[in-house]
Structures are given as C-alpha cells and as structure tokens.
Image (spheres, helix red, strand yellow):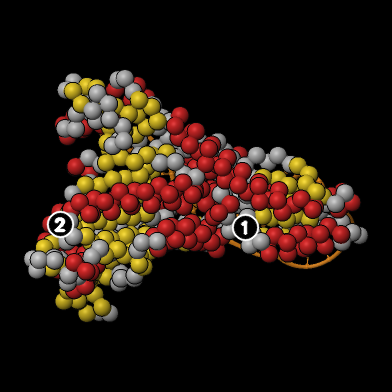
Amino acid sequence: MRAMEMNKDSEFSEWYTNILFEADLIDSRYPVKGMYVWRPYGFKLRNLIYGILRKIMDEEHEEVLFPLLIPKNEFMKEAEHIRGFENEVFWVTRGGSEELDVPLALRPTSETAMYPMFKLWIRSHADLPLKIYQIVNTFRYETKHTRPLIRVREITSFKEAHTAHATWEEAEEQVKRAIEMYKKFYDELGIPYLVTKRPDWDKFPGADYTVAFDTIMPNGKTLQIGTVHHLGDNFARTFDIKYEDENGEHRFVHQTCYGISERCVSAVISIHGDSRGLILPPKVAPIQIVIVPILMSDDERAMEVSREIERLLTSKDYRVLVDNGEERPGAKFYKWERKGVPLRIEIGPRDVSERRVTLVPRDTLQKRGVALDKLLEEVEQEMKEIEKRLSQRAWKKFRERVRKCEDLKEAREIVGVALLPWCGEEDCGKKIEEETAKDLLGEVVELRERSRCIICGRETERTIAIAKSF
RNA sequence: GGGGCCGUAGGGUAGCCUGGUUAUCCUAUGAGACUGGGGGUCUUGUGACCGGAGUUCAAAUCUCCGCGGCCCCA
C-alpha cells in the first residue's frame, strides 16, 4: 500500500517503512539485520542536516577522526562502561585465518578509543579545555526489533563530541553549552524536544549524569534524539588523564561527551511528513524548488520560461530542479510531493501568456499565481513562511501531547508524555513505570513546583516525564 | 526477556489449509505512438516462489534448520 493511502498517526510504522522506500531515502533490503543503505536522495538530506550540525559544532570544537577498532584491553578498562555495553559489542577476533592476540571491538561509542590519546595530548592546564568531535559509524549488536534510522546495528552517522576540562564545574558549564547547541540544532530543523535528566539507573554507563533530548513521534512514542553526559573524572581516573595546574599540581581532568545520531533525520521525516509523503524544511531539502513546465508539443514557451527562472533562482543559491521528464504533470506533482520538495512552481501556457507562474507550497498545497517580476521576493518570503509553519505545527502538536497528570490512570492512558510529581527514589520510579506501562524518561529540570510524589506521597519539587518510547 | 504472524518479479499481492498444466492481478520498467494545468491511453516486451536440508513419483504449497521482516506483551 502506498504511504499516501495511510493515516500517518495510527499506522505510523507502516507509513514510516513505506516513505523511506518511496521517497528514495533508504533501502532497507540490505541483507544484514539492522543495517541499511543510504540512497542518493536520502544521503543528500542527511548531509544537509549534518551540515547544520557541523556548523554548530565547528563554532567551538575541532573535528577529528578516530579508528573504528578498539583493542579489548582499552575497552575493558572502565568497569561501568563495560557493563553498559559488553552485551552489544561486535568483536573482530581474526585477521585472515589467524586468531588475533588482542581482540578488537567495533566501537559502540568512542570514549575508550579517544581517552588513551587524551592522556598523551593533555599535559598542562594550557591544553584545556579540549573540545573535539567526529561524525562516524558505530556498531551495536541490538537484540530488539531493529528499525531504519531508529534502532540500528550500524549507526552510520554518530556525531560524538568529547571535551576535557580542568574542573567539574567547568565540565558542567560545557554540559549546559551542549544543551544549548542541541536546542539550536533542533530549532533549525523545527523539531520539538523535551529535555530531561535521566534517572541514575538509566544514565550513560560511566557518567555522573545524563541529560537527554526526546521528541514525540506521530504515534505518540518518544524518540531519544540526543544525549549529553557529564563524565566527571571517572574516565580520567581510569585512563589516567591528568594535567598540571598553575601551581604545578597534577590533577585529573573532568570530561563531557554528547551525541546525536541519524535519529535526527528520522525525526525530520516523521514529524514534518504527512499522508502524501515528506515535507522537508527548506534548509535541508535536497531540492528546494521544483519547476514543472506544462509542456505542449507545439509550444516551447513554458520550457523557455522554466529555464529562465531556474537560472534566476540558482543564481540566488536555491537548489532548483526543472522536471522536464516525460511524465504528465499530475504524476510529477505527486512525485515531488512525496519527496517533500518545499516549493513547486508550475508554468503552463496560461501562465506564460499572463507573465506569471503558479506557486505551490508543499505544506499547504494552496496554489496561487505570482507575477514573474515579483517571483524572487515571493519565493524568499514563502520559504521563510514554510519553515515557520512547519516548526509551529510541530510544536503545537508536541505541546498537545505533553500533559501534567493527576493520577496514574490518566498517565497510563495518555498518548504522548505524561508529567507526574516524583520524589526521586528509584523504587517509586520503577513503580510508576509498572503502573503506567510506560518508560521513565527523566526529570524535567526546568519544571520545579511543590507537590507530592504520586507513589509515596512525600513532598517534592521534582517532575518526572514518562512515555512509551522507541 | 516472553509470545504471535509472515517471506511469491523493483514495490504490493492471489495461489498454500486440501502437493500435480504455462504461477494471478495491480504497479514499476524497456521500445513505439498518441498525449500533456493533479497519479494518461493503446500496441508490444521485461521480470518472482528467501537459503539449505528432508518427505514424495511430484514441493510456492508439508516438516526441520538458517537468514530476514512485522506485531503484541514485560
């Protein structure tokens, strides 16, 4: 069944699977479970999205590239870290037919690859802060149901940043900056988010604490789309990363790391799309404007005007395509709507005669005529409007799906995120999860108000967010 | 972690229960023609039983294993 015959919210899984295929984003037929092929159109979208992320990172980090393989002895150094990951690590144990002396892990994340080098790089306080990032593939042997871009065995596009600082407080400052960077990133994409502090038992293995970004998918399940970890000096102690301070004292560094994966692409696809297919924010659309000339065999004028407009828009750095293919106009309209092109310009004989074109934004599909000599301003304006509308629409729906709940029954029934008062104790947290059949996301740090824990009744100012999650 | 369903051309499917002729239909796609403001029409081509083992005169169909996909519950 075609995606456009589906209800995106109630049949989200099917819609998602279909749209990845029909919009030429991802081919999920690669014969290894949990590994998928980026097709050209999807890869362009990915690169445009990561371009935004990279630009934000480049403001205060330097990009690096570490090896994929991590020797077992380094990987096994940090006890908690191992416990968190050892069941999902792929191992390389042979070179050709020879057994390796030291087995090599395919990185599930790069702390244990990077930090032995940090030990070599960091000598003095002058080397701090150290802030680097890389965008790489990582591997996790997922045993649960895999899903393209969402739960994968090869994360193809893991942006991981790692920083080292002189003090715990400076590292905490970096955590806050990272949160702001990620907010900025998702704001640019028009993707709503909820920022929570993960409970202690669910933090990153080896971290002091973890802050996570979650968005809400069309079916009401949350998707974790970013995490920020304060590592304290845990890894520094394990990997012996010390610096000499102004007084000649040797001290352990304090570290942070934070990551975003291709789930950000999945969020853009899922949250903005509709039953007709993708709706891409202009900033990340591989094709921002498609021009469809209405071709008549005895009339070349539409084509001439199309080329003229293409030149005009290309000169203003828009990504433009003139679709002069053999399909009929209707078929082209559907095709480009499926692929989420934000703006369509139709040019037919009637338009040509009247020195105008027909402009159609992807999100509203409201056609309107625009005089040729006003086109550039109109396009510029419309692009801004599309971006604004997408973001507003997404946030509106998001807010409707986050609700403070008075009791567990209400929390259980909500489609989306339920907010409840919580004392902070693990027992009560687990009980909330059981009683509501939802997952505890974390504490909404920005939201503090006097209330009583929904389970034990103790006074508290904490609010916990719970939801069914991917 | 536990349970259930499924795998047939590039995509979606019928056939399977009850084994037997040339494997159904839609779509896609090649060539040609007419067309062209919301998924065109005609002509003519292309293309499939997930892999392996077993049962059988005979397997898309039955059994087992593997690989892959989907759903539900904790």
Chain on which label 1 sits: A
Say which amino acid is labelled 2.
Answer: Asp
| Residue A232 position within the rendered picture, expressed as x and y whole percent measured from the top left | 17, 54
Q: Nearer the viewer, residue A402 or A247?
A: A247
Residue A166 visible to the viewer: yes
Image disc number at residue A233 = 2
User: Which residue position is annotated with label 1?
Assistant: A287
Residue A210 percent location from the top left of the image: 25, 47
Task: Return the residue nearer the eye: A303 or A96.
Answer: A303
Nearer the observer, disc 2 or disc 1?
2
Q: CA distance from mark 2 to mark 1?
A: 46 Å
Residue drawn 34% across and 48% down? A179
The residue most toward the front is: A247
Q: Chain of mark 2?
A: A
Mark linked to residue A238: none
**Mark 2 or mark 1, which has the lower sequence index?**
2
